[in-house]
Image (tube, rainbow, N blue to C red):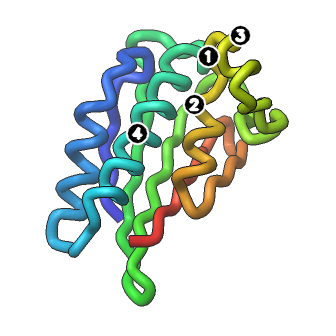
Amino acid sequence: MRSITVPANDGDPAPIVEFVQDELSQYDCTTRALYQIEVAIEEIVVNIASYAGLSETDGVEVRCEVIDDPLRVVVRFLDGGVPFDPLAKEDPDISAEAIMEREGGLGIFMVKQMMDDVTYTYEDGKNTLTILKRL
């Protein structure tokens, strides 16, 4: 498993997207799967930057592992921010009327819909959000 650390409050998903794409470059991934992983990364990075309460000097560690048979990728986001389980909230009402009135709050829901598994733990002072996508 390889990892990188990026500034926590930067909100720029590009280095993480590039890191994960590099890890996946030797595998036969569909364009759809790559797009879904990219969107999930963007949503998670924005949430960490916006809500974790981390300073400019804090980092987010991102670990990526590709597993064979069946082929899947696991990406873990670890930060030392305020403990917060984004999966604890109920899924939002996505009826047309509710969507029109809603401002934000759909990011984690989208991640849950696009990934095959999403888990959260808080251990040793770290939030860990893990996404898994079958390729």
**Which numbered disc flags the more N-terminal residue, 4 or 2?**
4
Q: What residue would you read off at disc 3?
A: 101
Disc 1 marks which amino acid?
Gly
Q: Nearer the viewer, residue 120 or 124?
A: 120
Q: Residues within 10 Å of mark 3 (few under 14, many from 20)?
A: few
Residue drawn at x 40%, y 32% is: 42
Residue for badge 4: 39
Residue 101 versus residue 68: which sits nearer the camera?
101
* Amino acid tagged 2: Gly
Kind of residue at disc 3: Glu
The reply to whether the C-beta atoms of the residues labelled 1 and 4 are less than 8 Å apart is no
Mark 4 surroundings: few (<14), some (14-19) or many (≥20) residues within 10 A = some
Q: Residues within 10 Å of mark 1 (few under 14, many from 20)?
A: few
Q: Residue 4, image x and y in percent?
A: 30, 44
Labels 1 and 2 touching (C-beta < 8 A): yes
Q: Are the residues at dot 4 and dot 3 in contact (C-beta closer than 8 Å)?
A: no
Q: Mark 4 or mark 3: which comes first in sequence?
A: 4
Q: CA distance from mark 1 to mark 4?
A: 15 Å
Q: Give the residue number, with chain letter if any, for mark 2.
A: 107
Q: Secondary structure at mark 2?
A: helix
Given this view, does label 4 or label 3 mark the residue nearer the observer?
Answer: 3
Considering depth in this image, is 122 or 109 the residue closer to the camera? Answer: 109
The quadrant of the rendering that contains the N terminus is bottom left
Q: Position of residue 8 (x, y in %)?
A: 43, 22
